[in-house]
Image (cartoon, rainbow, N blue to C red):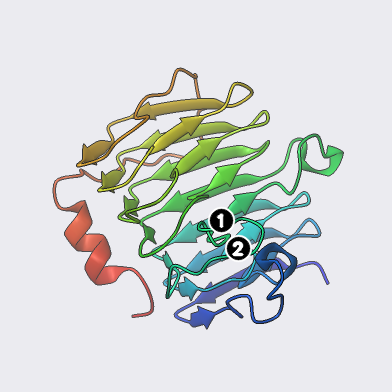
Amino acid sequence: MVAINVILRNIKIVGYNCSDSPGECKSGADAITVNKAGHHLWFDQLDVSDGSDGNLDITNGSDFVTVSWTKFSYSTKRTDPVTGSTGHRFSNLIGAADGLAIDVGHLNITWHHNWWADNIAERMPRSRDGKIHVVNNLFTASGNDYCTNSGNLSSLLVENNVYIGVNNPLQEDSDGNMLARGNVFTNTSGSKTASGTGFTPPYQLTPDATSNLEATIRSQAGPQ
């Protein structure tokens, strides 16, 4: 079934935490999967955790998706026989594989006022293709590998986000395109810069100031 014009709001969603695939977490289910060209979807005020493969993955030609005021996390620093200590704690994937024709011209996604919290290792989000706006989010997943990624022909605008105590806040692959501006980095290590041109969103949005953003998101992200 293709999801069209759907709003999902004020729900706590807990995945299988690899119990559906104890041999390799990525063979299990996402907590939420958006695929089959679903479009015009809004995920708002959710608490999403412990997806076996991912917490909320958006793939296969899906389009015009907004994710807002949502908290992502894993309950433990689980391990995995294949990925080892990272435990495939990979929260959010955009685009299932490089070079998929179904994704070209799609995967237009906005992430705003979300919180990537405890025990996430990677993919906050990881992006292929598409035009991805990452604005006014909070990242506190200490001990991680990287946070926000631009890869395989994706274009990202990453602005006015707050990264606290994380590694490699920004990861721009050689085939990605990321413009980063107005972000705040506190006690972070690794890559904090990007050299791309990004893109111009087709809507008007004035980003919130970053001065009180951490407190606002901590208190207001998730079901209300």
Of callouts 2 and 1, which one flags the residue occurring earlier in the amino acid sequence?
A: 2
Position of residue 142 relative to residue 73, above or below, is above
Give SS at disc 2.
Answer: loop
Q: Judging from the image, what secondary structure is the residue with disc 1 in?
A: loop
Q: Is residue 130 left or right of residue 104?
A: left
Measured as percent of width and height from the top left, residue 174 is found at: 59, 21
What whole-number distance in Å separates the C-alpha atoms at marks 2 and 1? 6 Å
- According to the picture, the residue beneath numbered tag 2 turns out to be 54
**How far across and down, in percent of the image, does residue 104 sit?**
77, 36
Q: Quick check: can you spot residue 91?
A: no
Residue located farthest toward the left when viewing the structure as drawn: 211
Marks 2,1: beta carbons within 8 A: yes
Residue type, label 1: Asn
Q: Is residue 10 above or below residue 60?
A: below
What amino acid is found at the position of numbered circle 2 in the picture?
A: Gly
Which residue corresponds to the image point at 61% horizontal and 80% vertical from the top-left?
16
Picture residue at 80% right of the left edge, 67% below the top: 2
Towards the viewer: 128 or 168: 168
